[in-house]
């Protein structure tokens, strides 16, 4: 029996994870669940999965959850805050941690899971983008197992001979090809992007996801973060990572080899496939996802990304090449800009401008410790808010 903690259980990845777990009650039990503010959803999950512990964001949310659970006679222990998240991620009673909190808030608990030597299923790409080498060192030094949930990285993992970790030269890998759907604005007239609404940006043609990653997909910053994620997971240098637009999202990514072979992983676009793969690895379990009917799909299309349409992609490559804390600056500025866009404080095309200004203004430094990374994260958030305030001036 594998005992699972889900960080971010009420989100899109959290809900898909619970859907897979519910299909295999003989294999998996739920040790702990976390949410931030969606207390009623978390209470319903506790009713179904009966975890020993549940964590929320604030004391008020904890009091509300406590009340809901006690009314049903559930004994789940209720806690709140970052320390409690780190505790459920590193407890001796859990084997596997699904890291599915969105954004930088997930870094501390995901790192705690790695340092406790857990099997870490990584959806929270921002945590790895921010901490890069430090995170990979923690995984190695504490004997943790890291399995990618992001569909592209899970696909690459499946197409590599040795899984994650620095791919040896003898493996003959020449390139990893990250596929991207291109999001909702792939074909839209660029001059009209200025006026798109948050709801339009969140209407992804192929994947149903949380709002932050949906906006990231529309700007293609999501692919940019994934380029950095691939670099750290597989040790691939920037020049060996290529992004290719593939609107059908049937091929989830590819690896090309020196003999001319290109291996790809295909499937219906549903996150339960990579989740089930990582949960059961190296075995295979049913995920609830329908088998791919390739003949019915008929045509697969590919094209190169237009960096003028998607400046965030170029910014991410720049940050990866700059190294140090540059990816952490990029991530923090992006989180602030996306939140401002979702709150309709800035327009869609101002997201990349805010990030570019922050990257220009703030010198990046060495990422020698998590303290340094967090200091740069805070500085970039403050700088992004200043830039946004400047944009709002009449
Ligand atoms: P959602 O927004 O749907 O869910 C986020 C989860 O994190 C929720 O449980 C939310 O709680 C919780 N949360 C939000 N803010 C905080 C905080 N400050 N502290 C603690 N918990 C918090 O996101 P997704 O599920 O879409 O994405 C999760 C992660 O997975 C992201 O890093 C994303 O990039 C990655 N990912 C997602 C994919 C997808 O298909 N959705 C695909 C590949 C990667 P509450 O519900 O209470 O707000
Ligand atoms: Mg992805």
Image (cartoon, rainbow, N blue to C red):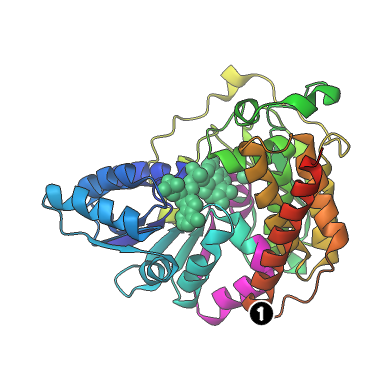
Q: Is residue 156 magenta?
A: yes
Q: Tell me: 14 left or right of 204.
A: left
Q: Which residues are magenta?
A: 129-157
Quarter where residue 327 is shown: bottom right
Residue 262 part of the magenta segment: no
Q: Residue furthest left?
A: 73
When the figure is inspected, residue 349 is found, relative to residue 32, above or below; the finding is above
The residue that appears at 63% across and 59% down in the rendered structure is 161
Q: Position of residue 226 (x, y in %)?
A: 68, 51
Badge count: 1
Q: In which quarter of the view is residue 381 placed?
A: bottom right
Q: Nearer the viewer, residue 293 or 375?
A: 375
Pointer 1 residue Cβ closer than 8 Å to ligand 1:
no
Image coords of residue 179 (percent x, y): 71, 40
Mark 1 closeness class: few <14, some 14–19, many ≥20 residues within 10 Å: few
Nearer-the-camera pick, 376 or 174: 376
SS class of the residue under badge 1? loop
Q: Is residue 104 above or below residue 293?
A: below
Vertical placement of 207 versus 327: above or below? above
Counting from the top left corner in percent of width and height, residue 346 is at: 72, 38
**153, 111: nearer the viewer:** 111
Task: Tell me which residue sits at (44%, 44%) in the image.
Answer: 11
Picture coordinates of residue 24, whole percent (x, y): 28, 47
| Residue located at (71% from left, 53% from top) | 385
Q: Which residue has dot 1 on it? A: 369
Q: Quadrant of the C terminus?
A: top right
Q: Main secondary structure of the magenta part?
A: helix
Residue drawn at 85 percent across, 65 percent down: 322
Q: Is residue 156 left or right of residue 227?
A: left
Give the left or right position of residue 371, taking residue 20 as reference.
Answer: right
Q: Is residue 139 visible?
A: yes
């Amino acid at each position: 029996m594998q005992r699972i903690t889900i960080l971010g259980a009420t989100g899109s990845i959290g809900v898909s994870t619970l859907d897979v777990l519910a299909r295999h009650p003989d294999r998996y039990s739920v040790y702990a669940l976390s949410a931030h503010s969606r207390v009623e959803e978390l209470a319903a999950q506790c009713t179904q999965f009966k975890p020993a512990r549940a964590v929320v964001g604030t004391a008020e949310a904890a009091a509300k959850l406590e009340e809901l659970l006690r009314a049903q006679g559930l004994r789940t222990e209720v806690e709140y805050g970052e320390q409690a998240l780190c505790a459920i991620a590193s407890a001796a009673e859990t084997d596997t941690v699904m890291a599915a909190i969105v954004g930088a808030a997930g870094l501390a608990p995901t790192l705690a899971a790695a340092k406790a030597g857990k099997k870490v299923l990584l959806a929270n790409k921002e945590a790895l983008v921010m901490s890069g080498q430090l995170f990979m060192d923690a995984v190695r030094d504490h004997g943790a197992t890291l399995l990618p949930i992001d569909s592209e990285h899970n696909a690459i993992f499946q197409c590599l001979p040795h899984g994650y970790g620095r791919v040896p030269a003898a493996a003959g890998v020449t390139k990893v090809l990250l596929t991207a759907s291109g999001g909702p604005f792939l074909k839209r007239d660029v001059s009209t992007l200025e006026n798109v609404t948050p709801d339009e940006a969140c209407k992804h043609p192929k994947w149903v996801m949380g709002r932050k990653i949906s906006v990231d997909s529309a700007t293609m910053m999501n692919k940019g973060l994934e380029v950095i994620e691939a670099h750290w997971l597989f040790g691939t240098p920037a020049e060996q990572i290529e992004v290719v637009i593939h609107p059908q999202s049937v091929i989830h990514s590819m690896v090309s080899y020196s003999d001319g072979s290109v291996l790809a992983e295909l499937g219906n676009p549903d996150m339960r496939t990579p989740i089930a793969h990582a949960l059961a690895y190296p075995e295979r379990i049913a995920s609830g996802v329908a088998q791919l009917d390739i003949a019915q799909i008929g045509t697969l299309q590919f094209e190169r990304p237009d960096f003028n349409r998607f400046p965030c992609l170029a910014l991410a490559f720049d940050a990866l090449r700059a190294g140090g804390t540059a990816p952490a600056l990029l991530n923090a500025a992006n989180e602030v800009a996306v939140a401002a866009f979702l709150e309709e404080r800035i327009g869609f095309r101002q997201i990349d401008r805010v990030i570019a200004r922050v990257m220009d203004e703030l010198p990046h430094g060495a990422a020698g410790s998590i303290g340094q990374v967090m200091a740069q994260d805070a500085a970039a958030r403050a700088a992004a808010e200043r830039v946004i305030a400047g944009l709002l001036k009449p």
